Image (spheres, rainbow, N blue to C red):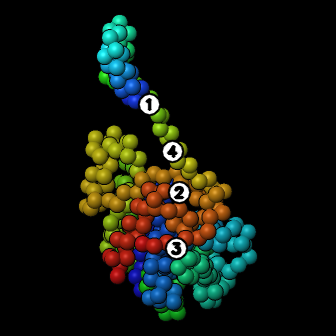
Amino acid sequence: MRRELGLLLNLASFVILAAGNLWVAAPLYAASIALLLIPQKVKKEEKKEEVRKEPTPDEIKRRPVAAPEI
Amino acid sequence: MKKLLFFSGAKGGTGKTTLALNTAVLLAYHWRDAAHYPVVYLDLTPSLGTGALLLVGDIIGAWGRPSLSDFLAGQLAEPLRAFYLRRWTTEKGPFQIVFAYMARDAPLTKRHLSLILDTVERRLRPRLVIIDMPPVAAGESPAAGAVDYVVPVVTPDASAIETTKTFTEVLGAPRLRPVLNMYIPDYPVSAVHAAPWVKVVQDAFGEEPHVIPYDKLLQAARQALEIEVLKLKPTESPGVKAIIEYARYLSTRLA
């Protein structure tokens, strides 16, 4: 989204410049450059740590018997 | 028939019952097609040992039945009447283990133990008898000279290692790989010996021990009165994983 907007502003600035309106084209160009070149702050998604739930004695009691393979 | 004794000298609480019972169950399953009664588990702890309690399933269930205590007290002529069968059905088929216990305190002599083992060999023809004995002083064990192999089980405890080492010499049977149980990786060095615990045990017994880490889940299974290897997966329990590795070693060593 940010990149698309930057490109659109950049294109618009050149069109306006071609139309002869330098004072409008210049800030538009600056804004487009800012949008395109300044890196976006990536929000680090906090990885939800999977909480390893240990079985309680009651849960162990209710488990079925498993084949004890060696 | 091979006779295997798990012991820890005069020390209790080293986890030998957990190891003995779990390996008995693992090998009973592993050899289920090789013999009708592949493994016999003898819990020789007076007044109902934990191993027998886990096999019986509840405390009340053990009361009133004939036990080896009756045989030792002369109230039971045939020791085999004190033996029981525990059978499990798994997703891969059934398997069973034969076991016996002592419901009350009774003096166990070498002669008695020899009679019991002879009867087991003659009538049940198992591949392996696993004996779980309570801690006794060196020189007083009726198992001295009666077993084929011994497995010393120790914890990271200087006195436990020393007493078990002395006991190994008294028993006289070939020693299998020692077990360092309840090992906490965060505390790998013995402050007394200024050496890693693994090295301390290796120096005491002449062989690098099999390490079983301390595992809270084993305690949880015990509180539930369940046999660990039947209810916990090796992927979730490092203790169970290490016990299975030791059973694998025993199956190769005793084959």
Residue mark closest to the camera, 3 vs 2: 3
> For residue A67, which numbered disc appears in the image?
3
> For residue A1, which numbered disc appears in the image?
1
User: Marks 1 and 3: same chain?
Assistant: yes
Mark 2 lies on a secondary structure that is helix
Residue mark closest to the camera, 1 vs 4: 1
B16 up-or-down from B78: above or below: above
- Left or right: B70 in relation to A16: right
Residue mark closest to the camera, 2 vs 4: 4
> For residue B196, which numbered disc appears in the image?
none
Give the residue type at disc 2: Leu
Residue B91 drawn at (x, y percent) = 56, 77
| Distance of label 3 from label 2 (alpha carbons) | 17 Å
| Distance of label 1 from label 2 (alpha carbons) | 54 Å
Q: Earlier in the sequence, mark 4 or mark 3?
A: 4
Residue B248 drawn at (x, y percent) = 37, 71
User: Marks 3 and 2: same chain?
Assistant: no
On the rendered image, what quadrant is the N terminus of chain A found in? top left
Give the residue type at disc 4: Glu
Residue B35 drawn at (x, y percent) = 47, 89
Give the number of callouts.
4
